[in-house]
Image (cartoon, helix red, strand yellow):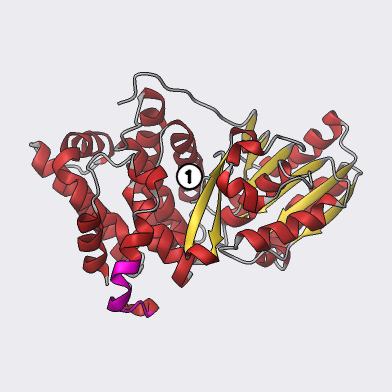
Amino acid sequence: MLEQYALRMPSVVYGGVDAISKLTEIIQQNGYKKVALFIGPHIKKSELFELPRKAIEKAGVEYEVFDDLPSEPSYMAVQKVIDQFKHTGADFIVGCGGGSVMDAAKLASILTTDDYGVKELLDDPGRGKKCVPIALIPTTAGSGAEVTPNAIVAVPERELKVGIVNENMIADYVLLDARMIKHLPRKIAASTGVDALCHAIECFTSNKANPFSNTYALEALDLILSNIEEACDNPEAMDAKNKMQIAAFYGGVAITASGTTAVHALSYPLGGKYHIPHGVSNAILLVPVMHFNEPVCKESFAQIYDRCCHDAVKNAATPEEKSAWVIGRLEKIVKHLDIPTSLKSFGVPASDLEQLVESGMQVTRLLVNNRREVTPEDARKIYQEIL
């Protein structure tokens, strides 16, 4: 556990019923003149678009919409949208969407300059400075991007996803409104929900875990393990969906104070080369990596059991039994949500094993967080398990 640690969060977070209406107040109180609205293409085509649109129009300001960002975008695709944004003269950014949309909006907030772009930040993330204030509205309960200083982009020439980390990308405002996830398709709710689950358990077992991150990670785990199935299965389960949205936010807070580990590190090549959705690739790796980590994480898993197991009769008594319950619970969730547990359905050939190992081992930013050292041979065994 870290001896020194810090907690960095958005300046203001609004949640609860009709939280999006606060957007009007934010714009008016700060005297913003023009809004750049980054929004997911599927949201733009749905009735959900009306919620942020009406709040902006009620503020009586001009706005411009950017909705052509692809899912799991490359850094070039993000740069293209940012180049369009830079010519608008907008003095406030609203990012409304999943992780990719919010990450693009965050990058835009530090890239009004022509001196460098997204590509340059891949090698030197600290160059970016906050230029435009930003509000983020998540439309999934998963990525935690609304609270983190991270932006993830695909780098095709490396067949890898890369995280750009810069504290200037932390949002000024976050609005958590459960209406934005009410009609989320089960498949997306499931994969993004498991992504939040990964954030929480990875941060709790990270080498960088600390009292700040543990507080949020453990609460996120309790909320997720108690609500994820109901939130995904029942479109009307608004209480469960609200709790999942809060849990995803807490998972993002845990990332800022701690950091994810080998699940995310080894999943980056799966998204970068095969374009497997981020939450799905994490879900495929979650149980294998936790089994790998179990020898050095039993005490942490036991803490999770003590906090998050609400069975009427608790049968686990030893750290080994409690640890087995936790990993079994993760396995049951992935199975219940019908998420694939191997790469077969994505056409990943066994012949790509060595390339996966090579790419995964490049993600040292996250691998150093893993409590059990991951060697190339360890990575090879984990990938072989899911091929």
Where residue 195 sits: x, y (%)? 42, 53
Residue at the location (34% across, 61% down)? 358
Tell me, yes or no, if residue 234 can be seen here: no
Where residue 341 sits: x, y (%)? 29, 68
Residue at the location (65% across, 47% down)? 137
Decide: is 291 above or below 305: below
| Viewer-nearest residue: 165 or 334 | 165
Q: Quadrant of residue 220?
A: top left
Decide: is 262 above or below 73: above
Question: Crowding near pointer 1: few (<14 within 10 Å), some, many (20+)?
Answer: many
The residue identified by callout 1 is 248
| Viewer-nearest residue: 385 or 13 | 385
Look at the image and say whether residue 199 sits in the magenta stretch: no
* Magenta-tinted stretch: 347-355
Look at the image and say whether residue 350 sits in the magenta stretch: yes
Q: Amino acid at mark 1?
A: Ala
Residue at the location (27% across, 72% down)? 387
Tell me the element at label 1. Answer: helix
Where residue 175 sits: x, y (%)? 65, 40
Please tell me whether the stretch drawn in magenta is mainly helix, strand or loop. helix
